Image (spheres, rainbow, N blue to C red):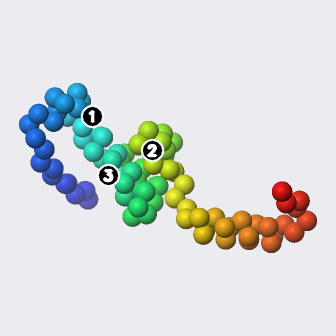
Amino acid sequence: MSNTISLEYPENLPDALHMTRAEREREARLAMAAKLFETGKLTSGQADRLVGMAPIAVLGELRRLKVSAIQTEPAELEQDLAAALAAAPDHPQQ
């Protein structure tokens, strides 16, 4: 089952974007998937399926759209680092 979203836009938008209809639709899906991924509303796998692209291709598109592929909060990174250091007490720290 799939759902459809309809979007109204000005008549001159296609000319301004210099894109075909298929390109505009693809770009709109990419923009929506990137924003939903960036805000934590979609996982990377869900974003891949929404766009209909391979995961590695979506990662490239995220980069093009300046969206980080790693969506981790600083506090979570600090917790991960502390856990890793606790798990390897003999590892030299810098």
Q: Residue at x 85, y 60 (%)?
A: 93
The answer to whether marks 3 and 1 mark residues whose Cβ atoms lie closer than 8 Å is no
- Which quarter of the figure is the N terminus placed in? bottom left
Looking at the image, residue 81 lies above or below residue 50: below
Sooner in the amino-acid sequence: mark 2 or mark 3: 3
Residue beneath label 3, please?
32
Specify the amino acid type for callout 2.
Lys
Task: Residue 9 in the image: state x and y as whole percent.
Answer: 13, 44
- Residue 46 in view: no
Specify the amino acid type for callout 1.
Glu
Which mark identifies residue 66? 2
- Of badges 1 and 2, nearer the viewer stands 2
Sooner in the amino-acid sequence: mark 1 or mark 2: 1
> Residue 79 occupies which quadrant of the picture?
bottom right
Q: Residue at x 37, y 54 (%)?
A: 35
Crowdedness of circle 2 by 10 Å Cα count: few (<14), some, many (20+)? Answer: few
